[in-house]
Image (cartoon, rainbow, N blue to C red):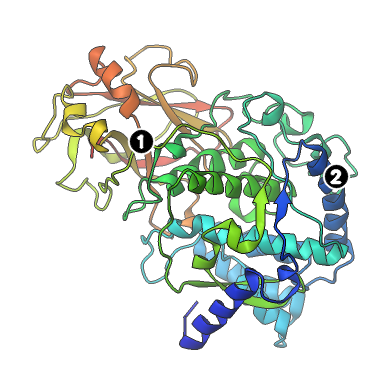
Amino acid sequence: MVETRRDVMIGALAGATAVGFGGLEAQAQTVSTRYSATSPQGKAMLVKYAKAVDIMRNQIPAGDPRHWNFQWYTHWIPGSANWNQAVQTKNQMLQQIYGSQPSYNRDLASAMWDSCQPHSYDPSNPTRFLGTYFLPWHRWFVYYFEQIIRNVLQDASFTLPYWDYLQGSVAALSIPPEFYTNTSSPLYKPNRNTWVNQGQRIDQQNPGALNLNAFKYGYYISNDGSTGFCPTLNNNPHGMVHDLTGNSTNMGYVPTAAGDPVFWLHHCNIDRLWASWNNMGYGNPDWGTRLFPFANGQGKRVDVLLNNASTIGKLGYQYDTYQKVPGAKRLRAPQFLKTAPLAATAAVAGEHHGGVTLSATGPTLLKLASPPRASNSGGSNLLAAAPPSKGGGVFLALAGVMADEAFGGTYNVYVGLPEGATPGGTDSPNYVGTFGSFNLVGHEHGPNAGPSLVFDITDKAADLTAKGQLGPSPSVTFVPQGEIGKPPTVASVSIVTA
């Protein structure tokens, strides 16, 4: 979207509206509360939510910004597996719904659809990382979706519940029963993963895959987009919950994810986690004058400044509870993924270049070679090179991770696992993290640019080094979990200190 001075002024005014100066979304001079879906208040809201979903699907005219599909397509349009196809598919969908004649709603759809961040890229620079917008864009998305529900229900008291899958109990890891026990409910979707609609924990194929490692970071994002709270949260739990809940026609695939009503409860929780991190005293970047269009409660266009979503207090809502986690540890932002191979300033313990396609059926083990330029190639000085006490750390960096399609399962990643050893699960001392396909599929990052995944292994480095498992040629092992379709590729794998 090309910004003009007029656009900036519109965005500033829209932001003022959002924080309580006129309009349906500004009804609340008082602060509204979003509740856990398992609480009595949250369950009462789910009854209202089911009614709203039915109205949006079946009573709101097609093409109206308050229609269910219009909101779904704002995230991404189904059937578009890459950026070029997304443009073509959007044009076809616009023609199908609105015809060729210009109209207010047609223009708004053209501006809003396929605008999810960071599931898009800068066409002038396909490698440009847009992940910094992930959290504020989705905050506005959920905020106006909530306003639309209030409008269609004519109920200003409605607030969207959140699904707290990190509560610590097995029951919390199952989707709320309102979404699967009644197959005729508007909240039911038959194309979730089979076990999910049976009420089982979403991570049953890989217990322990979800975590709160994002809270280890006291900064929002590094300049290269590789580390920090936002990109780590984007991968886990955000992307992981998508992968564990749905499949390539549902939550596990960006173009279809927002078609499932549980999507919104998931993103409500992601928003709560961000607010929880802010409550720990950590701040957000300045997003400048970047604007995005949304439809407000009445279905009218508002162009909003991302900066006006920096705190939920500005938007007039709060959560009934916030996530309690230990304080952040990583206060220095490493930047080592700007180039491939790694920037010469990075202290490299081992690396593998040339690309590898992961196995769909068994472990893929890589031996990382120590490059001649490495400043600490023996591995024994990893922690000395970047002392945690001074904000440093040891990181496993996967650069250029690409998936042509949603591959279904997930991959556990292990460091220093001896060849031939049984990997174990997420409780293995060598386990460092998990990834799935939701944040990897090509259309999200341009036609030739895969994202980078970074795992902070500082807490494991001392133990693994003492065991001799982070020596001159440490190993990295990828183990598939669940049924994998077409497996992903990884351009390079490195262990670095920063």
Q: How many labels does the image show?
A: 2
State which quadrant residue 36 falls in: top right
Q: Is residue 417 left or right of residue 407?
A: left
Observer able to see residue 224: yes
Task: Out of 13 and 460, give the one closest to the viewer.
Answer: 13
Residue 98 percent coordinates (x, y): 75, 79
Circle 1 sits on which residue? 329
Q: Which residue is drawn at 52% across and 42% down?
A: 437
Give the amino acid at mark 1: Lys
How crowded pointer 2 is (Cα within 10 Å; few <14, some 14-19, many 20+) is rated as some
Residue at image location 53% in from the left, 33% down from the top? 410
Q: Is mark 2 on a helix, strand or loop?
A: helix
Q: Quadrant of residue 331?
A: top left
- The image quarter containing residue 192 is top right
Q: In this view, does 454 lie above or below 61?
A: above
Hey, what amino acid is under mark 2?
Answer: Ala
What residue is disc 2 on?
A: 44
